[in-house]
Amino acid sequence: MENSYQRLLKNNRSWAQKHIAKDASFFKKLSVGQSPEYLWIGCSDSRVPANDVTGTKPGELFVHRNIANVVIQTDMNLLSVLYYAVDLLKVKHVIVCGHYDCGGVCAAMQNQDFGFVNNWLRSIKEVYAKHKTELLAIEDMAKRERRLVELNVMEQVNNLAKTRIVQRAWKNSTLQIHGWVYDGNNGQIKDLNYNKSGHSDMEDIFRYNL
Ligand code: CO
């Protein structure tokens, strides 16, 4: 019997053939280089595939995903992706897209021990603590979790704004940061209308003299 992973390789062959059938130079054009307009920072959750939910093609979206789409100032992986996307690829938009029913966010709002993952989820507990009054006023646990998902996205937009990478981009060109949430119940993305395109509304202490 065929191993389940071999289905992926088969799918890949037909995917490649389909593109070539439509446009013989499809891969040749992509091989020249990439100039995506967007950086997507999303959750690793398998149900939120960045290109699929945004209807974007190869070459359009630069992607970073981690558990619960968090922006941690010491995360070399995220910072490298952000630096490359902003400084070298010159993306115009950075999108933080969380999603309702996020396992990482659910875990962070409990006292259960998740072993090593506790470290990763710690920053979401900080978001919870920061907005405790608002969150505890929401009695329905599912609704409370949805709100924490939104607050977590907004906090990550703030965290991006605090980086030197983003502040340099604001000084030299234009860069917009957006906060979105994907709803797995209907497949739709909700724009939280939480955008940043400059540090005018930022606590002064986080601003660098660049
Ligand atoms: Co998630």
Image (spheres, rainbow, N blue to C red):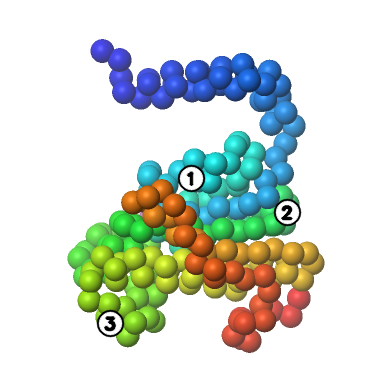
Residue under numbered circle 2:
90
Q: Would residue 108 be seen by someone viewing this image from the given angle?
A: no
**In this picture, residue 209 sits left or right of residue 61:** right
Badge 3 amino acid: Ala
Name the spot of residue 29 as percent of width and height, x first: 72, 28
Residue under numbered circle 1:
53
Q: Quadrant of the N terminus?
A: top left
Q: At 42% from the left edge and 72% from the top edge, which residue is drawn? A: 151
Which secondary structure lies at badge 2?
loop
Q: At 23% from the left edge and 69% from the top edge, which residue is drawn? A: 141
**In this picture, residue 85 sits left or right of residue 70:** right
Badge 2 amino acid: Lys
2 and 3 marks in contact (CB < 8 Å): no
Name the spot of residue 40 as percent of width and height, x first: 55, 52
Which secondary structure lies at badge 3?
loop
Name the spot of residue 142 as percent of width and height, x first: 26, 65
Q: At 70% from the left edge and 40% from the top edge, which residue is drawn? A: 34
Kindly indicate the quadrant of the structure image that contains residue 146. bottom left
Neighbor class of circle 2 (other Cα within 10 Å; few <14, some 14-19, many 20+) is some
Q: Quadrant of the C terminus?
A: bottom right
Kindly indicate the quadrant of the structure image that contains residue 9. top left
* CA gap, disc 1 and disc 3: 32 Å
Neighbor class of circle 1 (other Cα within 10 Å; few <14, some 14-19, many 20+) is few
